[in-house]
Amino acid sequence: MSQQENTKRLHWQLPSQGDVRRDDSGHRPEGEGPPAPRAPAPLTVLLADAQPAIRHGVRSVLERSGGISVVGEAATADEVLAETSRCRPDVLVVDPLMDEPTGMQVISRVLRMTPDTGVLVFSSVDDDKAITSALHAGARGYLIKRASADQILRGIHAVAAGEAIVDRSIADRLSALIRPATGQYYYPFPQLTNRERDVLDRIAAGKSNSAIARELALASKTISNRVSAIFGKLGVADRAQAIVLARDAGLGHG
């Protein structure tokens, strides 16, 4: 056998990285399927709580679950902002009362910095004023610290998907919390303009773009553009998801 033939055999037996081995007919050898698909990137989470024990406990739950990567921890509002800027997490799990009275403000400041970050409040406070303040600041979820590991995981995945989620003890009184006695709504979507909020309210009520355009005396194309902007800011893929998110927040009942 010539040296050239030896070289050709060697290259066939040791294909370069990324090549797919095939037989003389050009087909993959029997038993070899297509390359395995890559696993989806894990959700990235930033944990913010003044108590190291709480952060450690939640981190343990998340790291055991698989599919979630804790990319940072913070104990103060300033640390939350610094870590958010550094790692831009998919989800911020935060006790906003860690730095009273500025703790609640950290939610809206995070959302101005990284609008795609979902905020899940994880607090020991089951107080109407605190819940309303957090939702009004832009939090997508609010869980009480007695929540189980499954509830925490479900909350993180829901918030990451652009959905709204609250503790069971809060759900029954949520509508009253976001529609105070004055009859005016508290909108938990600070990233939207006032006109976008008007449009979202009508979307949640099940109205079409053409109906919304007539009510607001705007062109249908203008409404279509605003609907697209709303979907982008809320992180939803379609009208159905936007309706669920808005109705969970109390919109669409006016």
Image (cartoon, rainbow, N blue to C red):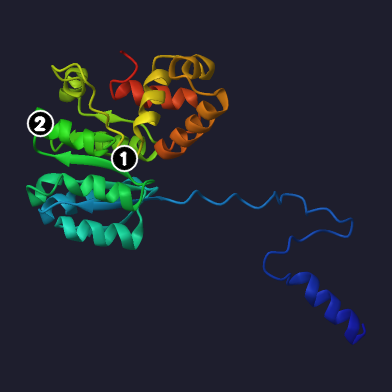
Q: Residue at x 85, y 81 (%)?
A: 6
Q: In which quarter of the image is residue 132?
A: top left
* Residue 160 placement: quadrant: top left
CA gap between label 2 and label 1 equals 23 Å
Task: Residue type at mark 2: give it.
Answer: Lys
Badge 1 amino acid: Ile
Badge count:
2
Q: Name the residue under label 2.
A: 129
- The x and y percentages for residue 248 are 31, 23
Q: Nearer the viewer, residue 30 or 35?
A: 35
Q: Is residue 237 left or right of residue 188?
A: right
Mark closer to the chain start, 2 or 1: 2
**Image location of residue 79, percent across then percent down:** 20, 60
Residue that sits furthest to the front in the current view? 217
Give the position of the C terminus as an image quadrant: top left
- Secondary structure beneath dot 2 equals helix
Q: In which quarter of the image is the N terminus?
A: bottom right
- Classify 10 Å Cα crowding around label 2: few (below 14), some (14-19), many (20 and above): few
Residue at image x 36%, y 35%?
193
Q: Do the residues labelled 2 and 1 touch (CB within 8 Å)?
A: no
